[in-house]
Image (cartoon, helix red, strand yellow):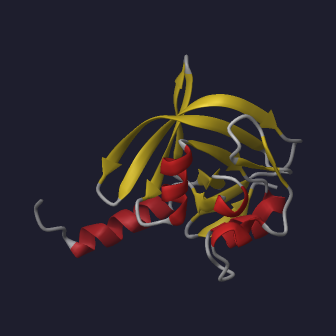
Amino acid sequence: MEPIDPALVEAFKRAMGLTASAVTVITAGQGEEARGLTATAVASVSIAPPTLLVCVNREGDAHRAIARSRAFCVNVLAEANLPVADRFAGRHGLAGASKFAGADWRSLVTGAPALDGALVSIDCTLAESVEAYTHTVFFGTVRAVRLGGAQPPLIHFDRAYRSLA
């Protein structure tokens, strides 16, 4: 691999920060093995079959939980879920299953935690994974979708949480 220009890296970080994205919490595992992370790297891949992709750093606990359980749930957050986003982003020093405290969670089909009060929870089984530098791109076949009530979404833009309300 050729050397990476640090100025290009900083410009790329700034450019990605100016891309408004939905804030999600990606979860996997059950009980004391449950893990999750706050992420914006989520995208629809296909409608037939319904498929999502998530990009997860290979060094994190959530990565290991997805690989081990072969399932994950994408929870698209509402503005009211900002404390959940902060916990799963590591802003309160919590780790492991303790990040799930303070919110209500249920399983849909795969057993991965689905957040009550999320705009939507999309439960997936792992279909494929591709290593890409520091991350793995996990492709998930959608097994269940739970829609929440109409609420203002939580958005990430310019390195901060925002709302459309």
Q: Nearer the viewer, residue 81 or 160?
A: 81
Using residue 37 as the reference point, say whether residue 87 is left or right of it: right
The residue positioned farthest toward the top in the image shown = 48
Does residue 73 sit above or below 154 in this rendering?
above
The residue positioned farthest toward the bottom in the image shown = 93
Measured as percent of width and height from the top left, residue 134 is found at 33, 60
User: Residue visible at 54% across and 45% down?
Assistant: 42
Does residue 48 sit above or below 122 in this rendering?
above
User: Residue visible at 61% across and 36% down?
Assistant: 124
Does residue 25 sit above or below 60 in this rendering?
above
Q: Name the quadrant of the N terminus.
A: bottom left
Using residue 92 as the reference point, say whether residue 57 is left or right of it: left
Does residue 42 sit above or below 89 in this rendering?
above
Using residue 136 as the reference point, say whether residue 82 is left or right of it: right
User: Residue visible at 79% across and 35% down?
Assistant: 146
Measured as percent of width and height from the top left, residue 17 is found at 49, 63
Measured as percent of width and height from the top left, residue 123 is found at 67, 38
User: Residue visible at 84% across and 69% down?
Assistant: 102
Q: Nearer the viewer, residue 89 or 8?
A: 89
Q: Name the quadrant of the C terminus.
A: bottom right
Measured as percent of width and height from the top left, residue 78 is found at 78, 54
The residue positioned farthest toward the left in the image shown = 2
Tag count in the figure?
0
Toward which corner of the image does residue 160 lie, by quadrant? bottom right
The residue positioned farthest toward the right in the image shown = 149
Toward which corner of the image does residue 161 lie, by quadrant? bottom right
